[in-house]
């Protein structure tokens, strides 16, 4: 057995010592001021309840706050503990979301394939399809995404997922360069239902296809201002679109800066290739 020095052992030992010192100090302080345990009990109960509630709602908190890496770590720990139970499917479903937002698309695709659909609620299959379509879009397989989404109507989805359904179809239209006006209408409807800054990226792309450059630029600015920092892929794509629009407006220098920044944060192989091509073109002009 190859044993290695683990610095975490010292860390945990020191943490234990500090904890004991604090506990002893607190007990001495309470005895000095003669504070009874009955007085402290409500505060202890409230603290424990608060901690329990925090742990229960940690996943939605991570989603809301954009703590995708933290959410991933939490779910992986939970999955190791409940392996082999029906609850695994639900946790894997959330794990897909955290993977996607970090740009870990291969991991997300593998996780989708690992899910046992029989362990999920009946209406969850439509959400799995929505996630599959999103992964096809990232992989620039826009027609495949439309083939998946074309099996459904917005009423087939929970209200919270309906806007994403509309947006994904519109983004596939943008990618294929078809039905641009219809895509703008769908994105506008999606944004009206939920003002997601990710939808602003789709709108910017569609407007760019129509050569409505100022409007497209405004939508990219909105997206980059509102998107969470953890939403790496969408932020990088917004930068890519902004660079294209600036280049079309004659601002090669601004486009170059924007494209380089987008490339520095991009985690998508396809997007990296597109950015490399754009940067090569911009540098040849300067």
Image (cartoon, helix red, strand yellow):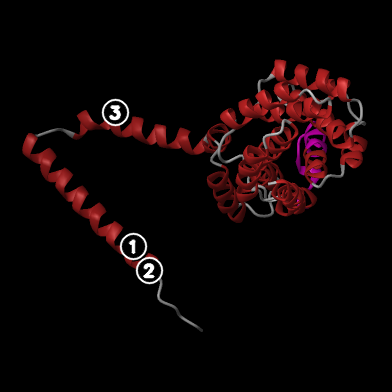
- Disc 3 target residue: 42
Q: Nearer the viewer, mark 1 or mark 3?
A: 1
Residue density around tag 2, few if under 14, some if 14–19, many if 20 or more, within 10 Å = few
Magenta stretch, residue numbers: 114-130
Of helix, strand and loop, which one carries label 2?
helix
Extreme residue toward the front, this view:
286
Residue 24: x %, y % from top left: 17, 50
Q: In which quarter of the view is residue 203 placed?
A: top right
Image: 81 above or below 63: below
Kindly tell me whether residue 285 is visible in this rendering: yes
Which residue matches tag 2?
Answer: 7
Residue 172, given in percent of the width and then of the height, sits at 85, 34
Residue behind mark 1: 11
Tell me if residue 205 is in the magenta stretch: no
| Mark 1 vs 2: CB contact within 8 A | yes
Q: Residue at x 19, y 53 (%)?
A: 21
Residue 163 falls in image quadrant: top right
Q: What is the x, y in percent for residue 282?
A: 71, 46
């Amino acid at each position: 057995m190859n044993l290695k020095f683990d610095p975490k052992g010292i860390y945990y030992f020191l943490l234990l010592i500090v904890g004991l010192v604090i506990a002893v100090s607190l007990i001495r302080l309470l005895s000095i001021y003669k504070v009874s345990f009955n007085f402290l009990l409500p505060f202890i109960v409230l603290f424990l309840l608060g901690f329990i509630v925090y742990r229960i709602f940690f996943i939605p908190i991570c989603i809301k706050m954009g703590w995708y890496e933290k959410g991933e770590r939490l779910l992986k720990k939970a999955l190791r503990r409940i392996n082999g139970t029906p609850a695994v499917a639900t946790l894997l479903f959330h794990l897909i979301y955290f993977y996607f937002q970090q740009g870990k698309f291969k991991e997300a695709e593998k996780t989708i394939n690992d899910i046992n659909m029989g362990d999920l609620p009946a209406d969850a299959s439509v959400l799995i399809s929505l996630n599959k379509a999103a992964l096809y879009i990232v992989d620039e397989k826009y027609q495949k995404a439309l083939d998946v989404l074309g099996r459904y109507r917005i009423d087939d989805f929970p209200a919270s997922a309906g806007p994403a359904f509309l947006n994904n179809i519109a983004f596939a239209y943008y990618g294929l360069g078809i039905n641009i006006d219809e895509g703008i209408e769908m994105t506008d409807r999606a944004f009206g239902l939920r003002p997601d800054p990710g939808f602003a990226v789709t709108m910017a792309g569609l407007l760019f296809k129509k050569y409505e450059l100022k409007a497209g630029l405004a939508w990219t600015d909105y997206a980059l201002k509102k998107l969470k920092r953890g939403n790496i892929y969408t932020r990088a794509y917004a930068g890519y679109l902004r660079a294209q629009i600036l280049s079309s407006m004659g601002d090669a220098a601004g486009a170059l800066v924007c494209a380089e920044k987008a490339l520095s944060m991009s985690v998508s192989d396809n997007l990296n290739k597109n950015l490399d091509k754009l940067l090569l073109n911009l540098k040849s002009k300067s």
